[in-house]
Image: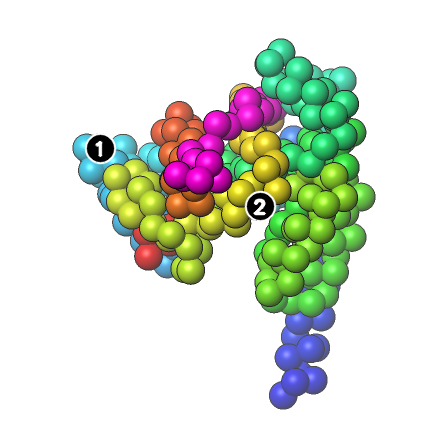
Amino acid sequence: MKRLQTIGEWLLAQLVRLIFALLRALGPDRASNLGAWVTPRLGVWTRNHKHTMDNLRLAYPEKTEAERLEIAKEAWANLGRTACEYPHLEALFDVANGRVEADEDSKRRFEEIRVSGKPVLVFAAHLANWELPAVAAFKLGQPAAILYRTPNNRFIAADIVAMREPIMGQLIPAGIAAPIRMADALDRGLTLGMLIDQRFGRGPRVPFFGHPVAANPFLARLARRFGTPVHGLRAVRLPGNRFRLELTPALDLPRDAKGQVDVEASTAMVNGIIEGWVREHPGQWLWMHRRWR
């Protein structure tokens, strides 16, 4: 049975490699547009669409069902675009051709972090193309480490690492050893990035769209231990397969009576920032995840 499972994983990996090859041949624009056309038509028939609509009812009780369905379709299109853009991440970060832009404040903050050479914690969310912020940080000269979730298929996992490491920096797989590796990355002065908007069962419960969610506290714990500045970084999807990058100022995290970073209050704070991002562009967030489980 184990051998059959390995063969099945290998065959699936071959299929994924073939799909990625076809997407590369299409180029970034046609690949992205294909994803936006296909995924909404398929996604609404999946079990995840029910999760999506349930989440939208929780988050937007004031909206009509038709309005929530429109957001869901936009979210499916964004997911399709993001998946089909995966083989083109390096090409997407093309400042020279105007594919990616940033405001002057964000550019200045990126440069200040690069020049300082000091470790920085950066959080992001599953918005627009959520892989792009990691590419941006690395391409802008910031030695980086990224926390990521390893696919179950070992062959696909190896392919993803091979694709991502040259354009993102060190990849730290989520797991038991992740906190040690993240601490080591900060000790070495790296910019450490992580997506923190998904459910974390062992984390504190904080408000998100007016309902409690179990949130990831690692960012706040590392800030407390290392005294490292914390920034938020997001990509916003623009018309014409373009993106805008926005880097927040260093956050003034809540402190406890001893003057140390308050982990639960800080976790609530960064989730509040992410909620604000989602409210600005609800169709660009990954509503399919069961965030309020």
The Cα atoms of the two marked residues, 1 and 2, are separated by 42 Å
Residue 182 in view, yes or no:
yes
Quarter of the figure that contains the N terminus = bottom right
Location of residue 3 (image quadrant):
bottom right
Q: Say which element carries label 1.
A: loop
Location of residue 14 (image quadrant):
bottom right
The tag on residue 225 is: 2
Q: Say which element carries label 2.
A: helix
Name of the residue lying farthest toward the bottom: 1
Give the residue at x 20% y 38%.
61
Name the amino acid type tagged 2: Arg
Residue 288 in view, yes or no:
no
Magenta residues (range): 242-261
Residue 197 picture location, percent across and down = 46, 44
Answer with mark 1 or mark 2, whichever residue precedes in sequence. 1
Observer-nearest of 21 and 3: 3
Give the residue at x 19% y 33%.
62
Name of the residue lying farthest toward the front: 258
Look at discs 1 and 2 and give the one toward the viewer: 2
Asked if residue 228 lies in the magenta stretch, the reply is no
Residue 195 picture location, percent across and down = 54, 44
In this picture, residue 178 sits left or right of residue 76 = right
Asked if residue 252 lies in the magenta stretch, the reply is yes
Residue 136 picture location, percent across and down = 69, 31
The residue carrying pointer 2 sits among few (fewer than 14), some (14 to 19) or many (20 or more) residues within 10 Å by Cα, namely few
The tag on residue 63 is: 1
- The reply to whether callout 1 and callout 2 are in contact (CB within 8 Å) is no
The residue carrying pointer 1 sits among few (fewer than 14), some (14 to 19) or many (20 or more) residues within 10 Å by Cα, namely few
Give the residue at x 72% y 65%.
155
In this picture, residue 29 sits left or right of residue 57 = right
Q: How is the image coloured?
A: rainbow
